[in-house]
Image (cartoon, grey):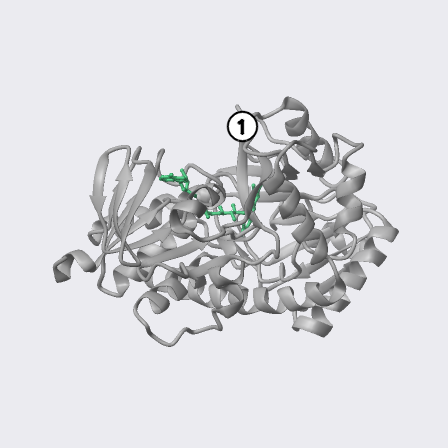
Amino acid sequence: MDASESDHVVIVGSGIIGIACAHYLNQAGLRVTVIDKGSLAAGCSHGNCGYICPSHVLPLTEPGAIGTALKSLLNPKAPFRVKPRFSPAMWNWMWQFAKRCTHRQMLTAGGHLKSILDSSLIEYKQLMQVEKLECEWTENGLLYVLQTPHGMREFAQTDRLLTEHFGVTARRLESAELPDFEPALKQGLAGAFHYQLDASIRPDLLNSEWTRRLQSRGVKFIENCELLGIDKADGRVTSLRTSQGAMPVGRLVLAAGALSTRFSSMLNCPIPIEPGKGYSVTMERPEICPRYPMLFPEHRVGVSPFANGYRLGSMMEFVGYNTEIPERRIQQLRDSAAPYLVTPVGGGRPERWYGWRPMTWDSLPIIGQVPRLSNAFLATGHNMLGMSLATATGRLIAELMENRPPHIDPRPFSPARF
Ligand SMILES: Cc1cc2nc3c(=O)[nH]c(=O)nc-3n(C[C@H](O)[C@H](O)[C@H](O)COP(=O)(O)OP(=O)(O)OC[C@H]3O[C@@H](n4cnc5c(N)ncnc54)[C@H](O)[C@@H]3O)c2cc1C
């Protein structure tokens, strides 16, 4: 292989993680091609809530998560739902997940998440300053609104934990202050916590703007090009078999989101990811549209106001690679917003959407070199935080590939941990 070929990086997956990796590898002077089995960024990175949220340091592996999952077996309307099915991989995943639902493990995973969340926010700010991507980047914080006094008391405990262990602080708003602060909220809600450092974007705009910018710098994006097989020799990936034919490769980055796990045996490396299915519905802005992106923890629903639209998103279903969008789930999103908002829904023809979050059993992303293949890297498993973690992931991949000192400790995210 000549020098120019060894500098050719192929990234599999054009979601936010693939795009961010392409950005940092292009900046490092490497030749980059991104392939995707479908249209560009049409997977989980398309219709999510768009929060860039360092406040989300607490992992899903928290005490009580298993109880919530067990209750969901009896309740098809539960926002967090596990559907029992014959899948040894899924049951092993659940068992590994369950083992980590302790207070100690939650704090450890939270510490690792904090390092990459904080770094990502800094990287995003620089990216927006330099590239000026038109993606509705807003530094408006994220408002967690509680309906009941009980919910407020419970969330106050979470807030205290965030402050004491991670230095993540919020402004607490009492019931009487809320209508002035956010006129879209109904009267009589219990209160809210405003995490002022969080930011937000419109995901589809970020993906398309960033892709266009990279294309103008020579990054090649190929749609409808599915990775089918991986050829290896002497501890290296030599070429890829794709639906568009063979593709020589100098280095490989697998950023195939929830579908990454399909390449475990080809890469001779466990990639334990289960799809965590979520839904969103996007409509016109309602008459009184929220100023702030918001989360309603008691109903587990998120609200994302955009310049020309409005999105409700939520749910976490472990139901395999299921592609249905049941109307009852979409209705549930609308119903969940109703107790909080003066006008909870907007008009127009709604876009109904689902996405498979790439869920790992320890709530941490998988970033780094594949243990037995010197030129193959994983950038996947970003759980509920792929938008928030993309920039630091891209930077870390470029550093590890180029053997530069990493800007954060990469060991908690190493593929070798499984
Ligand atoms: C309802 C909902 C709300 C969310 N809200 C937020 C939020 O507010 N903030 C946040 O940080 N995160 C959020 N997330 C999570 C976030 O969307 C994901 O973590 C993130 O999009 C994952 O990005 P990705 O690039 O890894 O995967 P994807 O976007 O799924 O991209 C993977 C790509 O790989 C391609 N691919 C797969 N297999 C192959 C193959 N064999 N060959 C070629 N290409 C292939 C796919 O076609 C796809 O385009 C949310 C998720 C959901 C469902």
Image quadrant in which the C terminus is located:
bottom right
Q: Is residue 84 left or right of residue 403?
A: right
- Quick check: 414 above or below 326? below
Foreground residue, 92 or 129? 92
* Placement of 398 over or under 390, stated as above or below: below
Q: Is residue 302 visible?
A: yes
Where residue 303 appears, as percent x and y from the top left, is 62, 43
- Residue at the image position 85 percent from the left and 48 percent from the top: 148
Number of numbered discs overlaid on the protein picture: 1
Q: Is residue 49 visible?
A: no
Residue beneath label 1, please? 323
Determine the secondary structure under disc 1: loop
Where, by quadrant of the figure, is residue 80 drawn?
top right
Residue 239 position, x and y percent, is: 24, 47
Q: Nearer the viewer, residue 89 or 54?
A: 89
Residue sitting at x 31%, y 53% = 252
Rendering coords of residue 225 (x, y %): 29, 35
